[in-house]
Image (cartoon, rainbow, N blue to C red):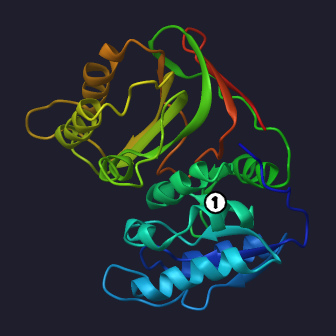
Amino acid sequence: MQRPPALRHGSKMRVIAPSSPFDRERFDRGHALLSQRYVLELATSLFAREGYLAGNDAARLADLVQSLDDRETEAVVAARGGYGVTRLLPALDVGAIRRAGKWLVGFSDLTALHGLWARAGLCSIHGAMVCSLPEAKAAYQDAWFDLLEGLPPKPMTGLTRLCGGRAEGRLFGGNLTVLCALVGTPFQPPLTDSVLVLEDISERPYRIDRMLTTMIQAGCFAGVRAIVLGQFTDCGPGPDGTTVEHVLIERLSPLGIPIVANAPVGHIDDNLPLLFGAQASLDADRGSVHFEAP
């Protein structure tokens, strides 16, 4: 895995909307925050809307390809997630991503693009997007900037032990729903030898069960070294009372690998940025994960 070149004050960052439309007021706050540090260029179709998509597939794809082709752009950052990236995957060239060597920043629906960056051998940042970064506390914003600007990733501590043990592997993962949607497609990301991060939002526990069961039966967890569970936001129990915590333990503990939970990662204001592609050392008994950047 290769870490893209570090950004500096005045670096050019291109903002794209490869998924869903976004709230303009929230975007403007994020734009103002990032403009204090970087030169922001907005994708041509950034403010387009077509139903639940931020413009048609051709326009969203063209914006992403243009971001890769522009030699001055050093980072590609999403305005928000939602849905839509998986529709673009067949038209994207992993070789072009590798040659461009740029940062990708985002989470949720951007999980599908993180998979392409991983196939290209490039690190990427699973973290807040333009519309959500202003909602984070200053320490989390600073961590976001630090990763882009070449500083080493800080460890995670105080995590909850679900299954004990130690393991090392390449940090990867993202949104469970998106990862499950990629199962059986040519774009299913390789998870072998990974420390796998999982998070989700607004899914009933039985749906989390169904997605994990699909991935287990498809062999997706074969070779995964350890699991870091982020936040499962608004995934409360249904009328039966079964909690998402129960489902996660019941479905994942038979894997026999170290598992920690309650990582500050996912659909929350203080969404800790993670350097996907970094070497992660997880100690479940101590509730910690340390990282070594490429």
Point out residue 68 in the picture as x, y percentages from the top left corner. Answer: 68, 74
Q: Which amino acid does label 1 sit on?
A: Val
| Most foreground residue, 149 or 92 | 92
The reply, left or right, for residue 181 in relation to residue 213 is right
Q: Mark 1 points at which residue?
A: 105
- Establish if 203 lies above or below 256: below
Q: Residue at x 25, y 27 (%)?
A: 247
How many badges with numbers are in the image?
1
Residue at disc 1, secondary structure = strand
- Establish if 142 lies above or below 199: below
Q: State the image quarter where residue 133 is shown.
A: bottom right
The reply, left or right, for residue 175 in relation to residue 169 is left
* Direction front: furthest residue: 95
What is the quadrant of the C terminus in the image? top right
- Establish if 138 lies above or below 151: below
Q: Which residue is drawn at 56% across and 75% down?
A: 26
Can residue 134 be spotted in the picture?
A: no
| Most foreground residue, 76 or 88 | 88
Q: State the image quarter where residue 4 is shown.
A: bottom right
Point out residue 242 in the picture as x, y percentages from the top left corner. Answer: 17, 30
- Establish if 124 lies above or below 155: below
Can residue 196 be spotted in the picture?
A: yes
| Mark 1 burial class by Cα count in 10 Å: few <14, some 14-19, many 20+ | many
Q: Which residue is drawn at 73% across and 67% down?
A: 100
Q: Which residue is drawn at 52% across and 60% down?
A: 113
What is the quadrant of the N terminus in the image? top right
Point out residue 61 in the picture as x, y percentages from the top left corner. Answer: 50, 80
* Direction left: furthest residue: 240
